[in-house]
Image (cartoon, rainbow, N blue to C red):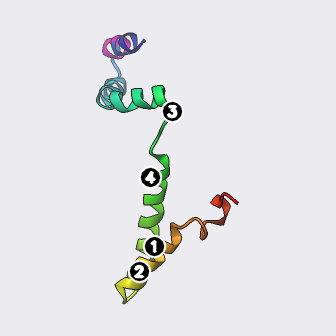
Amino acid sequence: MLRRFYTRCAASELPELHRLATTIETWWPQIHAFLTTGITNAGSEGTNRVIKTIARDAYSFRNPENQRLRTRTATTRRHRGHLNPA
């Protein structure tokens, strides 16, 4: 199926399909790993997004320790009550 996809993209005149085929070829090991295991890094990516957002919001703090504590607090399970396994 993958070879058929690449063949159809190569036969197409659309540059977007050529870029799509290139992107899929580049990322194929990661895509294949997800398809076979079902494991993603979505949790860590979500946590990184929260950290960056909170750090941006806390950038104006004069004390770097307060900025660090605010970022750490935002990423704990107790703070994110809807994710608490209780």
Q: Amino acid at mark 3?
A: Gly
Point out the frontmost of discs 3 and 1.
3
Q: Is residue 24 above or below residue 59?
A: above
Q: Are marks 4 and 2 in contact (CB under 8 Å)?
A: no
Q: Which residue is mark 4?
A: 45
**Residue kind at label 4, given as amino acid type:** Glu
* Mark 2 or mark 3: whose residue is earlier in sequence: 3
Question: Residue 27 appears in which quarter of the rendering?
Answer: top left
Q: Position of residue 20 (x, y in %)?
A: 36, 28
Q: Which residue is mark 2?
A: 67
Q: Of tags 3 and 4, which is closer to the observer?
A: 3
Determine the secondary structure under disc 3.
Answer: loop
SS under mark 1: helix
Whether the residues at callouts 2 and 3 have beta carbons within 8 Å, the answer is: no
Q: Magenta region: which residues?
A: 7-11
Q: Where residue 30 sits: x, y (%)?
A: 37, 33
The residue wearing badge 3 is 38
Q: Looking at the figure, which quarter contains the N terminus?
A: top left
Residue at coordinates 34% horizontally, 24% vertically from top-left? 21
Contact, CB < 8 Å: mark 1 with mark 2? Answer: yes
Give the residue type that dot 1 points to.
Thr
Residue at image point 67% right, 61% down: 82
Magenta-span inclusion, residue 8: yes
Could you classify mark 3 by the number of other residues whose Cα lies within 10 Å: few (under 14), some (14-19), or many (20 or more)?
few
Residue 42 included in the magenta stretch of the image: no
Pointer 4 or 2: first along the chain: 4
Residue at point 41%, 72% (across, down)? 56
Name the residue nearer the viewer: 20 or 14.
20
For the residue pair 15 and 27, the one nearer the viewer reads as: 27
Q: Amino acid at mark 2?
A: Gln
Q: Earlier in the sequence, mark 3 or mark 1?
A: 3
If the image is split into quadrants, where does the C terminus sit? bottom right
